[in-house]
Amino acid sequence: MEAKQLVAEELVEKLVNGKFRLLWDAKGRRNEALDCLVYASAALRVSVQRWQLDLEALATSRKSEEQDTPTLEQLAAMLAGGVNGNNH
């Protein structure tokens, strides 16, 4: 669905105030996915510029959080031990 929305608008020639102008026309098709992508890109850019968001530091901290988080198998084993009364 998102791929269709990327090509929802097309450049058409329209008569405006007696002159032909090239305008983007959605022709009734939806394109919210593209709008969301543009807004998210703008928000990221503002965050980096205005608040000095350090993307490399954020990625590093997320990786360390992922290493500290138990896997699904580990969680299942811990929960199974608690249910069965075993504390492995």
Image: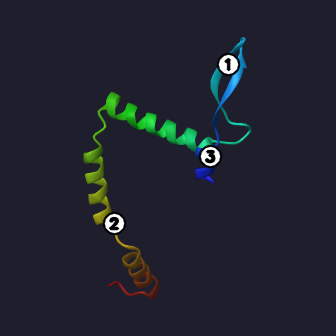
Q: Nearer the viewer, mark 1 or mark 2?
A: 1
Find the distance from the CA under tag 1 to the CA under tag 2. 60 Å
Q: Quadrant of the C terminus?
A: bottom left
Name the secondary structure under disc 1: strand
Q: Are marks 1 and 2 in contact (CB under 8 Å)?
A: no
Q: Nearer the viewer, mark 1 or mark 3?
A: 1
53 versus 75 height, above or below: above
Name the foreground residue: 73 vs 14.
Answer: 14
Residue in the picture at 28% in, 65% down:
67
31 versus 61 height, above or below: above
Residue in the picture at 68% in, 42% down:
30
Residue in the picture at 26% in, 59% down:
64
Residue at label 2? 69
32 versus 81 height, above or below: above
Q: Residue 20, which numbered label?
A: 1
Residue in the picture at 71% in, 42% down:
29
Residue at label 3? 5
Find the distance from the CA under tag 3 to the CA under tag 2. 37 Å
